[in-house]
């Protein structure tokens, strides 16, 4: 590819063609949805993805168990009709099964204590059955935009002040931290049934740890980490964890290339985040799970809604 890509729009208003597409940076949930919705509007797009694959923090393994296990985006945090909202096409039959938690009886181990789903505000949560967020996007969203994705394209510079927007790419990695100050004095840890609702006889326990709660695991080698976790569980399950341990898989998002983190916590005031999400000169638009409107935080559905807002702003520009 050329070191510079030209993109719409010009300073007189929104114009678009195959020579000057809307350029989307990142093929995660927000980037894929933005491209998908723009394509539905007949808009030409290019998606620049730094990695060699799409999905961002939507990731799964199909070799660990007899059903796919998410290694990133896991739950549907809102009503399952979000799936039809994403597809945005009544003619498409969405053949996806989900299992909703029962907040009155289902529980998890939160911070080492047994706690009901209702207490940790997971009342609306559902799990995909024999599927994941990655599989859903792969089946229903990606086919529309895959040929427009350019992999290995790390964006170095965006010049949106000239008459024509220029996007420079290279093989160098540049990280921009905008408005967020990561802290380690906050976090959470959750043990949950990773086989919940699945058509499987396997017993698989998931551990979700972020922020300060993840540090004790990250400082250890893989072997030490397993021993540490089993010791932690043995105290809860009277030694049965070690006795029944078979194997494990570990995903550290802090060291994942081009991602460098699990998710954004809702510690910042949402009005400040909304301000950060405003367009630059009406030509550079922002979407992603960090750009909350105050209704939700860091989830696929939030990335979807932010993408819809960005696409609408582009069409209105």
Image: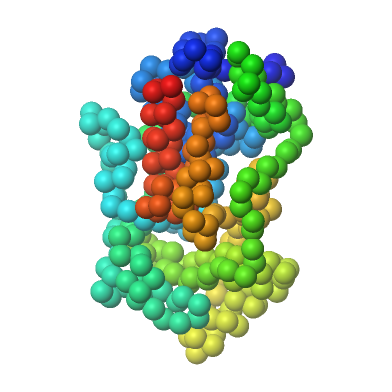
> Quadrant location of the C terminus?
top left
> In this rendering, would 142 be left or right of 118?
right
Q: Is residue 50 visible?
A: yes
Residue 71 appears in the rendering: no
Q: How many marks?
A: 0
Q: Nearer the viewer, residue 209 or 186?
A: 186
- State the residue at coordinates (64%, 16%): 162
Q: Nearer the viewer, residue 12 or 177?
A: 12
Q: Does 69 appear above or below 12? A: below
Residue 289: x and y in percent read: 48, 47
Most foreground residue, 244 or 126: 126
Q: Which residue is at a point 58% across and 79% down the rendered structure image?
A: 230
Q: Nearer the viewer, residue 165 or 114?
A: 165
**Colour scheme:** rainbow
From the viewer's perspective, is 3 left or right of 78?
right
Q: Is residue 145 above or below residue 28?
A: above
Which residue, as the protein is rendered here, is positioned at the far right? 172
In this view, 260 is above or below 286: below
Which percent across, then down, holds residue 61? Answer: 52, 51
Q: Position of residue 66 (x, y in %)?
A: 44, 56
- Residue 216, position as x, y percentages in the image: 66, 73
Can you say which quadrant of the picture contains the N terminus? top right
Q: Residue at x 66, y 69 (%)?
A: 215
Q: Is residue 178 left or right of residue 206?
A: right
Q: Residue at x 56, y 68 (%)?
A: 187
Where 180 sits versus 186, above or below?
A: above
């Amino acid at each position: 590819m050329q070191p510079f890509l030209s993109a719409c729009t010009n300073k007189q208003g929104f114009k678009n063609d195959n020579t000057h597409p809307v350029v989307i940076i990142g093929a995660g949930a927000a980037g894929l949805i933005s491209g998908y919705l723009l394509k539905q509007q007949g808009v030409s797009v290019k998606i620049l993805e730094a990695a060699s694959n799409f999905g961002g923090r939507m990731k799964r393994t199909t070799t660990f168990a007899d059903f796919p296990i998410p290694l990133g985006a896991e739950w549907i945090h809102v009503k399952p009709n979000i799936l039809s909202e994403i597809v945005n096409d009544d003619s498409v039959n969405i053949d996806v099964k989900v299992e909703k938690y029962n907040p009155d009886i289902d529980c998890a181990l939160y911070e080492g204590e047994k706690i009901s789903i209702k207490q940790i505000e997971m009342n609306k949560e559902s799990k995909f059955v024999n599927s994941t967020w990655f599989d859903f996007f792969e089946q229903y969203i990606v086919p529309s935009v895959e040929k427009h994705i350019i992999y290995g394209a790390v964006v170095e510079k965006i010049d949106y002040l000239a008459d024509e927007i220029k996007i420079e790419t290279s093989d160098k990695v540049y990280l921009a931290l905008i408005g967020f100050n990561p802290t380690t004095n906050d976090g959470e840890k959750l043990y949950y049934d990773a086989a919940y609702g699945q058509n499987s006889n396997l017993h698989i326990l998931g551990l979700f740890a972020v922020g300060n709660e993840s540090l004790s695991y990250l400082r250890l080698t893989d072997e030490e980490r397993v021993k540490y976790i089993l010791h932690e569980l043995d105290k809860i399950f009277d030694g049965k964890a070690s006795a029944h341990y078979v194997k494990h898989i570990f995903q550290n998002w802090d060291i994942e290339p081009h991602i460098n983190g699990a998710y954004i916590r809702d510690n910042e005031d949402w009005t400040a985040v909304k301000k950060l999400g405003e367009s630059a000169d009406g030509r550079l638009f922002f979407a992603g799970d960090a750009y909350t409107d105050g209704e939700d935080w860091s989830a696929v559905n939030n990335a979807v809604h932010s993408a819809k807002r960005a696409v609408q702003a582009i069409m209105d520009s």
